[in-house]
Amino acid sequence: MNARDCEQFEEFMTSRWPGLVRLAFGLTGDRWLAEDLAQTALASAYASWWRVSRADDPDAYMRRILINASKSRLRRRRVSEQPAATAREAAVSDPTASVDERSALLGALQELPPRQRAAPAGLVTQRLAGSW
């Protein structure tokens, strides 16, 4: 886009902003969502400014862009927000269970004679470190 087109778009955008936000608010009922929707419509208009500026009625063209953006938002939301048939809770392991297991294992090793304890000690260390 050249400098002249950028200037035209900026003038168009600043003069149409309040009306676009009002229309978007009528579609959404939410002020912040209305502003986001108006920004989305203006971004689309900027991308195809040559088409918007040459339309018979650029205001009607912008309203159509905004309405289509609103419909797209509703379609995406409707598809992505379908609730699951049943909610599953993620299983959480008890963090104290590993401490209890380690204590029991070390207690059992202490009961072994020193020579029997020496061979598996390396394995126990690997097991406790999680590399086994």
Image (cartoon, rainbow, N blue to C red):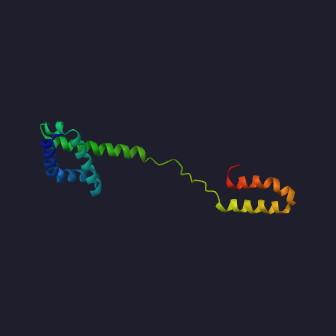
The correct choice, above or below, for 88 with respect to 104 in the image is above
Percent of width and height locating residue 57: 13, 40
**Which quadrant of the structure image shows residue 4?**
top left
Q: Residue at x 67, y 52 (%)?
A: 130
Determine whether, in the image, residue 109 is placed left or right of residue 66: right
Q: Residue at x 13, y 45 (%)?
A: 8
Determine whether, in the image, residue 16 is placed left or right of residue 94: left
**Which quadrant of the structure image shows residue 76?**
top left
Q: Residue at x 17, y 49 (%)?
A: 13
How many labels sit on residues? 0
The correct choice, above or below, for 35 with respect to 51 in the image is below
Please say whether residue 92 is visible from this viewpoint: yes
Percent of width and height locating residue 51: 18, 36
Q: Residue at x 39, y 45 (%)?
A: 78
Closest to the observer: 2 or 33?
2
Determine whether, in the image, residue 109 is placed left or right of residue 96: right
Please say whether residue 30 is visible from this viewpoint: no
Percent of width and height locating residue 41: 24, 45
Determine whether, in the image, residue 7 is placed left or right of residue 113: left
Considering the image in quadrants, where does the N terminus appear? top left
